[in-house]
Amino acid sequence: QVQLVESGGGSAQPGGSLRISCVASGLSFDKYDWGWYRQVPGKERELVAKIRRFGGGTIYEDAVRGRFTISIDNAKMTAYLQMDSLEPEDTGVYFCNANSYAFDYWGKGTLVTVSS
């Protein structure tokens, strides 16, 4: 059974930092692209950052490029999103995603709230 479990969310002030993690089990971690998506009430889930399993190339939402960094640790089967210089607009539920050509898995999300 595949499980993706996010953690590390919480509250931060504007300009602060948080690191969220996604621990995976039940799959071959290095055979997936890994992504973080954000969802706010009334809106669709949006891609924040993605890292590809081949070559490690990364993609970032324009609003977070230069502030957020996605990374993975194959040995720990964990994906991370380091979020710096946080802004109120970064508030939302962050979901971890594992994607291959044939499969697509999601975690249950972790809430990030940025406010003063």
Image (cartoon, rainbow, N blue to C red):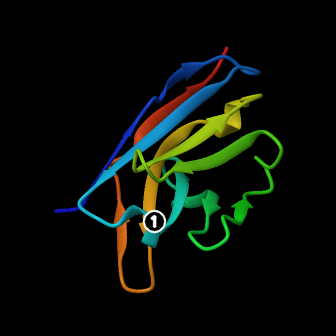
Apparent side of residue 107 relative to residue 50 in the rendered image (left or right): left
Residue at the bottom extreme of this rendering:
102
Q: In what element is the residue under mark 1?
A: helix
The answer to whether residue 32 is above or below residue 3 is: below
What is the quadrant of residue 30 in the picture?
bottom left
Which is more toward the observer, 71 or 110? 71
Apparent side of residue 83 relative to residue 3 in the rendered image (left or right): right
The answer to whether residue 65 is above or below residue 58 is: above
Point out residue 53 in the picture as x, y percentages from the top left corner. Answer: 56, 69
Q: Amino acid at mark 1?
A: Asp
Residue that appears at 60% across and 27% down: 18
Apparent side of residue 38 relative to residue 84 in the rendered image (left or right): left
Point out residue 86 in the picture as x, y percentages from the top left corner. Answer: 72, 29
Residue that appears at 55% across and 28% down: 113
Which is more toward the observer, 86 or 57? 57
Question: Would you name the residue on which mark 1 appears?
Answer: 30
Residue that appears at 53% across and 20% down: 11
